[in-house]
Image: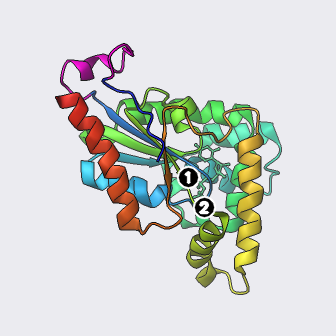
Amino acid sequence: MKSARRDCAPGLVSARVLPLIRGAMPEPLIIALDGPAASGKGTLARAIARHYALAYLDTGSLYRAVAYLLLREGADPSDEKAAAAAARAFSLETIDNTGIRSREVGAAASVVAAHPAVRQALLEFQRDFARRPPGGAKGAVLDGRDIGTVVCPDATVKFFVVASPQVRAGRRFRELEAAKPGLTQADVLADLMERDARDAARADAPMAQAEDAELLDTTHLTIEAAFAAARRVIDGVIRRCES
Ligand code: CDP
């Protein structure tokens, strides 16, 4: 694991770090998880949110909701104007729709996510969620592709979660196979590789590891082991800040 987070380190004072040095955790406490498709960041993010009583936002669901709206209207996800209009019209109800988890919507989500106007339309919602977490939570966990780099560059703790393509394809295949007879793991692997390449190559907010993010490779980790590793990092930051 690459160790890089510098909260509480002397000489690196930013507006966000200052309250930590005085011995208090920043409020809100923001935890950012980025990484490629099906790397385990969503499962990990939910476990972290539950354990630390933080609000959770799956930012991929926003892009999926925009893609879902477009596909439902028969619009082309590569049409930036139509995609931006859908992004401005999206609501949390659309996100609850289980249709957004499909393979087709995932692929279209990565097409709409490359449009700067779509990203711009969704940015304030995400930042607002982090700054003012719903339900009176003391902080928020956000997972996506650009949380540590663009949405919340001053997050308290950042992770970049990865796993080998084969392992990721196996995990996603098991999630999708019941709903899609005839689907193969090779199909899923091809989808993931295409999506990752598009997400990493786009000009606006590409998927990237923030320089102060911890690299967490879940290839050989169970969910419990990945959560334990993340907790060690988060508790370490909290302890350093409280001492
Ligand atoms: O769950 P999975 O890892 O398959 O993907 P997701 O998090 O649901 O994201 C779907 C797509 O939304 C990604 O392939 C990205 O193109 C896009 N996305 C993004 O551009 N920025 C984010 N912060 C989150 C997702």
Q: Magenta span covers which residues?
A: 9-25
* Res 17 visible: yes
* Picture quadrant where residue 114 is located: top right
Q: Is residue 48 left or right of residue 239?
A: right
Callout 2–callout 1 Cβ contact below 8 Å: yes
Which colour scheme appears in the figure? rainbow
**Is 114 rendered above or below residue 175?**
above
Going by the numbered disc 1, the residue's amino acid type is: Ser
Q: Residue at x 61, y 41 (%)?
A: 89
Residue at the image position 24 percent from the left and 32 percent from the top:
240
Q: Secondary structure at mark 1?
A: helix
Return the disc, 2 or 1, that comes first in the chain's sequence.
1
Horizontal and vertical percent position of residue 239? 21, 36
**Residue ID for mark 1:** 61
**Which label belongs to residue 100?**
2
Q: Give the quarter of the image for residue 28.
A: top left
